[in-house]
């Protein structure tokens, strides 16, 4: 039998073909081997550089400001929704996956008015229906959408939704978490008031910092909206204005690593460069998996180059847990599905992964299908 090869990151860890946290570079991790005080001038300088770099990514100029929020990405989404939507507001949520559902839960807990336009996880929002809702329901003040809905990997039409929202004079809020830094979101082309993302997705930092890029003229008017002390973006921002400091302990090491990650992001050519590497990863993955007989959930035109959902094979010899464990043994970590429309699993293309890693994963998958005696990984019925 041929020797099993085990793939590894630069630091010898398994490769994370997941929606996050992701494989990061060695230099990003190495940036964390120091201590800084939160009032240390060196740290404050690094933090300010991170916050202004993030504004550049959306071409936000002087109109936008980054408000960081300690915690994972959801902390930033909850902070955005509860700070921007006032108690008297009502948000139209465009939902086609678990992250849209999460936004609904956040709004309900916070007691915000909610209207829903929900489509299946493999379907785009119906913009004519959205327009009708905007026309018919004058109480709607905000519209929320997820850029890449990581549940399936679908790319939502953020520019069209932005144009519609603008036409009806509503405030547009975006969860761009898994797309930010890999798929262009240009504030000069898409009109929005806030976008939430985090340190540990396409910028390839470590987890621990969420952030919201906020339109200053709108953020200024959100005082008193927040439902919690911690997730109050207005207060966090106002405090930066007054003291240059976080209100509560910042994740210093995460921020310093994020600073290094942003330098590596810029060195790769920013959104264009990073987006190209991920698109190449995604193409190799989908072509290779199709060749093996797997079927992706989404047609290519709906697929974002972030994470790919595959239908579960019908062959009874294909046991997902065994498949997962065998891939992990070879150094590749994949992700279970989260769909309600179909039994599935997911493979990510983001993080410090290159073409050779995707090819390595495909080789391992081919071997494992042989070991499991799976004749064909076709799903039960054609997608
Ligand atoms: C990852 C992700 C989040 C945030 O998830 P956390 O686990 O809180 O980091 C939010 N929205 C989308 C679309 C995501 O992909």
Image: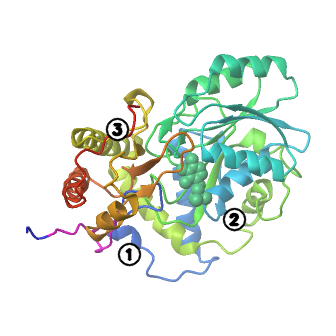
Q: Which residues are magenta?
A: 4-15
Q: Secondary structure at mark 2?
A: loop
Q: CA distance from mark 2 to mark 3?
A: 51 Å
Q: Residue 23 location, x and y as percent? A: 38, 63
Q: In the rendered image, which residue does mark 3 sit on?
A: 295
Could one spot residue 60 in this view of the protein? Answer: yes
Q: Secondary structure at mark 1?
A: helix
- Disc 1, ligand 1: is the CB inside 8 Å? no
Q: Which of the labelled discs sits on residue 244, or is there none?
A: 2
Q: Quadrant of residue 74?
A: bottom right
Q: In the rendered image, which residue does mark 1 sit on?
A: 30
Query: Which numbered disc, 2 or 3, marks the residue closer to the eye?
Result: 3
Left or right of 2? Residue 165 is right
Q: Which of the labelled discs sits on residue 199, or is there none?
A: none
Say which label, 2 or 1, has the lower sequence index: 1
Magenta stretch: helix, strand or loop mostly: loop
Magenta stretch containing residue 233, yes or no? no
Q: Residue furthest right?
A: 88
Could one spot residue 24 in this view of the protein? Answer: no
Left or right of 173? Residue 120 is left
Left or right of 352? Residue 4 is left
Q: Residues within 10 Å of mark 3 (few under 14, many from 20)?
A: many
Q: Secondary structure at mark 3?
A: loop
Q: Residue drawn at (70%, 22%), measured in percent from left and top?
A: 130
Q: Residue drawn at (90%, 45%), measured in percent from left and top?
A: 87
Q: Residue 381 location, x and y as percent? A: 40, 34
């Amino acid at each position: 039998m041929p020797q099993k090869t085990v793939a590894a990151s630069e630091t010898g860890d398994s490769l994370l073909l997941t929606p996050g946290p992701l494989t990061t570079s060695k230099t990003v991790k190495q940036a964390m081997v120091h201590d800084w005080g939160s009032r240390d001038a060196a740290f404050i300088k690094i933090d300010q550089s991170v916050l202004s770099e993030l504004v550049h990514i959306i071409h936000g100029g002087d109109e936008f400001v980054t408000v960081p929020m300690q915690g994972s990405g959801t902390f930033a989404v909850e902070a955005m929704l509860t700070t921007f939507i006032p108690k008297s507001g009502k948000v139209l949520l465009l939902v086609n996956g678990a992250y849209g559902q999460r936004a609904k839960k956040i709004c309900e807990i916070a007691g915000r008015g909610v209207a829903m336009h929900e489509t299946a996880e493999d379907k785009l929002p119906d913009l004519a229906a959205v327009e009708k809702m905007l026309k018919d329901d004058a109480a709607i003040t905000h519209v929320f959408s997820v850029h890449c809905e990581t549940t399936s990997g679908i790319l939502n039409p953020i520019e069209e939704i932005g144009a519609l929202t603008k036409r009806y004079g509503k405030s547009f809020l975006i969860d761009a978490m898994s797309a930010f830094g890999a798929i262009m979101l240009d504030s000069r082309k898409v009109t929005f008031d806030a976008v939430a993302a985090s340190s540990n997705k396409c910028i390839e930092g470590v987890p621990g910092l969420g952030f919201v890029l906020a339109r200053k003229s709108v953020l200024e008017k959100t005082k008193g909206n927040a439902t919690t002390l911690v997730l109050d973006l207005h207060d966090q921002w106002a405090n930066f204005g007054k003291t240059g400091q976080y209100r509560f302990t910042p994740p210093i090491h995460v921020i310093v690593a994020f600073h290094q990650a942003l330098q590596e992001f810029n060195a790769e050519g920013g959104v264009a460069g990073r987006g190209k590497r991920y698109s190449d990863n995604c193409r190799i993955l989908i072509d290779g998996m199709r060749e093996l007989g797997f079927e992706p959930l989404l047609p290519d035109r709906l697929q974002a180059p972030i994470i790919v959902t595959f239908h579960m094979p019908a062959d009874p010899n294909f046991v997902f847990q065994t498949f997962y464990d065998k891939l992990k043994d070879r150094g590749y970590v994949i992700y279970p599905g989260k769909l309600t429309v179909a039994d599935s699993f997911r493979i990510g293309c983001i993080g410090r992964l290159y073409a050779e890693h995707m090819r390595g994963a495909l080789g391992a998958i081919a071997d494992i299908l042989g070991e499991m005696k799976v004749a064909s990984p076709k799903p039960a019925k054609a997608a």
